Image (cartoon, helix red, strand yellow):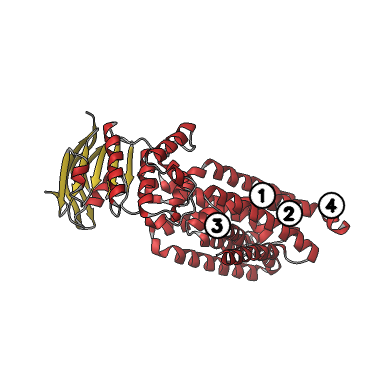
Amino acid sequence: MTERLILKNLCVKYGNLKILEDVNLTVNSGEVVFITGQNGTGKTTLMKTIAGLINRSSGDIFCTPKISYVPQNEDSNLDFPAKVKEIILTGTQRPRKLFYTRSDKKAAMKSMQTLRISNLANRELKTLSGGQLKRVFLARALCGDPELLLLDEPCAGLDAESHEFLYEVLRKIRDTGTAIIIVTHAESDLDEIKPAKVINISHGRIS
Amino acid sequence: MAEFLELFTYPFVIRAILAGCLLSICAAVLGVILVLKHYSLIGHGLSEIGFAALSISAAFGLSPVIISTPAIILASFVILFVSQKYKVAGDTAIAIASSSALALGVLVTSMTGTNSNAYTWLFGSVLALNDLDVILAVILSLTVIITFTIFYNRLFLISYNEEYAKSLGIKTGIYHFVISIMTALVVVSGMRIMGTLLISSIIILPAVSARNISHGFFKLVINSAIISFACFVTGLLSSFVFNISTGACIVLINALVLMIIKLLKLRGN
């Protein structure tokens, strides 16, 4: 097993307000880690810090560069005039790569097939339902072939069938060696996939 | 008809068509990014700074291009930096910079007795175009179109969701500078034809029109360029036929197209 993420004494502050304090965590390839905790305890901040969207105040993050983050809400961009296939292709973008290759387009098609959304390829985001959007954003994350997948409440608002399907996909992804961190409130998620660790965050600390 | 065809025998008409067609296309594709990122005001702010630069260069007997190009690029950096750094003050910064620059331009023209040039700078004139202007407009327009093509996927991503772009490891700040330089180049190359007060219209209006009829980002860019090109040629030729201001004619035709598209869409709904 290869280490995909190591957090050492991670601290995040907004001004003088401590959001995360001394968080230590190791996630290996093929592992699923659940992060639980009440609202406002710092779960999303932890995910965004790992994804590089929030700067840490102190501590260290050692992380694979092949990381995909699916936020809880991406509602602010739903009016953007783009087709689903255009959005999913963005998952293959990397810092030193300006153009899509044929293999990128194949990866996008494959991830759409995996999530069973090939029929939505030419639809615009604003025409999709909440469940369809969740699948689109997961497909986008998968087509970048991530080694570490960060999912912030991926099942929020999904019906039972979609919930079951999503975990079926996640189990397959885990079995290919991808490490997955899932923020969740639902205890029923524990029945869907066996996590290597369940971490509860309380007042910015792992309890 | 013969009179209309005779227009194409005049060198200034050919110069205007050559420079203007490229300008209209690059302004329109850039406009898509500016509209989607809510940067519509930046083009207007920069063009008024261009007016101040033109006034100062005329006052000191310097080349308008040599002064206005770096001044507008520098101003675009400052405006975007302020917009990014102090998000709430973005539009305020543009308003302060543009109105101050316009006032400075008016002051300089009135003090140096170059009022007669001011009308041309503000509202443009195809008759004022010389060979150097055309060469400059072609080079700058091609630079913008090539830059847009090279960075197309990145500009799409940045316009769609900056936070997501950052999560992919993309340094979004670099692309803000790419956008600001392209905006500055469009404003510089278009000021002589459209005038500093009207240039921002051909950046924004075609993109807004195209957004109402396009499905997907790529089609939006293509439709914006087609609408802009068609409106430019129609406006330019109409202005020659009816002997009216070219810049104003092009802007009004763009506005008319937008109104027609909106009405048809409302009727369709």
| Chain on which label 3 sits | B
Q: Quadrant of residue A62?
A: top left
Mark nearer the N terminus (2 vs 3): 2
Mark identifier at residue B9: 4
Asked if badges 2 and 4 are on one and the same chain, I answer yes
What is the CA distance from the residue labelled 2 to the residue labelled 3? Answer: 27 Å
What is the CA distance from the residue labelled 4 to the residue labelled 3? Answer: 37 Å
Residue mark closest to the camera, 4 vs 3: 3
Residue type at tag 3: Arg
Secondary structure at numbered mark 1: helix
Q: Compare residues A48 and B190 and report the one nearer the observer.
A: A48
| Label 1 sits on residue | B22
Residue type at tag 4: Thr
| Label 3 sits on residue | B211
| Chain on which label 4 sits | B
What is the CA distance from the residue labelled 3 to the residue labelled 1? Answer: 21 Å
Secondary structure at numbered mark 4: helix
Residue type at tag 1: Leu
> Contact (CB < 8 A) between labels 2 and 3?
no
Q: Residue furthest front?
A: A161
Q: Compare residues B161 and A183 and report the one nearer the observer.
A: A183
Q: Residue furthest left?
A: A207
Residue drawn at x 20%, y 41% is A33
Asked if badges 1 and 4 are on one and the same chain, I answer yes
